[in-house]
Image: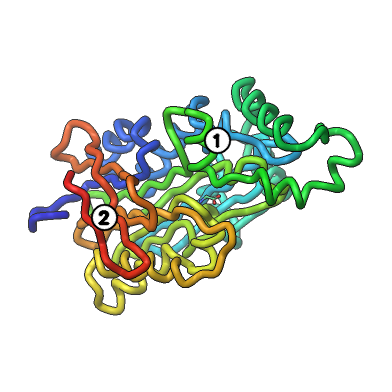
Amino acid sequence: MSDGRVTHPLLVASRNADIGFAAGMELLRAGAPALDAAVAVVQRVEDNPKDHTVGYGGLPNLHGDVELDAMVMDGSTLKAGAVAALKGFRHPVVIARKVLETLPHVLLAGEGAAEFAREMGFEEESLLTDEARTIWKRRLEAEADGLPPGVARYYRHMARLARSLAKDPEAAAQEHGTDVTGTVIVIAQDHAGHLAVATSTSGWAWKYPGRVGDTPIPGAGGYADNRYGAAGCTGRGEMAMRAVTARSVVLYMKMGLPLWSAAREAVLDLYALEDEFASGVTLYAVDAHGNHVGMSNQEGRTYIFQTAHMTAPAERPCIFVGPDGRWHIPSS
Ligand code: GLY
């Protein structure tokens, strides 16, 4: 929370973004726009092969393909750009920004997104690391009942396999003991107080090919509007899509709720969803004054932030909101 001082430049993000904070803060300190900083942070997470939930090294879908989703949104203009189910390019967030800058569209998916990336001169490469392939195969072999990918029968059982195997990025990463977990979301606020959000993920591991989550959907996985604030989500994207969670936080602020109350309303909206696969969703939100909060329907989540006065990011616990609407504020 801010104490009335000007808090920007500011970065607020999911924990796995710490690897990119130095680059993002350097840009903000030099006077760069919020969007530049948010993209720079996310790009570094996409490069991190140890993060099995974002970019290079991400866990693949049921076919063994790494399919990536990413989005950017500029709170000054409300312009957004996004790519979904993109294969073969390690920086989907940069391609998402190109969509924003170049096309009369917001979201490109699948082969069209890849075609656009090629046309824009991005380099194509394999994103599946040996480590990610090993994790993917081990679980598939253990749970797919002798149905190795490649045999015809496997492809007749993919819906069943997606139901039993697909894992939200945070759960998948935790289960396999990786250091850094989950979709990355970054909110940046620059010297002028302008806000931007950038997101990126490899989505659900062992997902049905073509599955797209909240991360590339403006309003669901991220939203920024300078007038009120910005928000982003990690966790089970299907829930954030159905509740339009990031936009909800900003809209509740527009309707007059303070930051914490706005975020709590958005968490309560998640509890209203009937969902046999319901799991954790964590929100990261910043208001126009640079106050920030992390809030979740799951206990034990944290987020990171850094202002220009700080030499390194600080980690702060997210507030857990229970189904009864009570918030549980952990001591930091
Ligand atoms: N929140 C990321 C996903 O569900 O793909």
Q: Which mark is residue 55?
A: 1
Q: Quadrant of residue 39?
A: top left
Tell me which residue sits at (70%, 31%) in the image: 142
**What residue type is disc 1 on?**
Gly
Residue ranking furthest to the top? 130
Q: Secondary structure at mark 2?
A: strand
- Which quadrant of the figure contains the N terminus? bottom left
Q: Nearer the viewer, mark 2 or mark 1?
A: 2
Q: Which mark is residue 324?
A: none
Number of residues whose C-alpha sits closer than 10 Å to that of mark 1, classed few (under 14), some (14–19) or many (20 or more): many
Query: Where is residue 182 drawn, in percent x and y?
Result: 47, 41
Residue ranking furthest to the right? 152
Marks 2/1 in contact by CB < 8 Å: the verdict is: no
Badge 2 is on which residue? 293
Quick one: 292 or 197, which is closer to the camera? 292
Tell me which residue sits at (45%, 53%) in the image: 280
- Which quadrant of the figure contains the C terminus? top left
Q: Is residue 227 visible?
A: no
Quick one: 120 or 288, which is closer to the camera? 288
Quick one: 130 or 85, which is closer to the camera? 130
Query: Where is residue 159 drawn, in percent x and y?
Result: 76, 52
**What residue type is disc 2 on?**
Val
Count of picture labels = 2
Q: Is residue 227 above or below residue 186?
A: below
Tell me which residue sits at (52%, 25%) in the image: 49
Left-right relation of 39 to 10:
right
Mark with earlier residue (2, 1): 1
Number of residues whose C-alpha sits closer than 10 Å to that of mark 2, classed few (under 14), some (14–19) or many (20 or more): many
Q: Is residue 209 above or below residue 214?
A: above
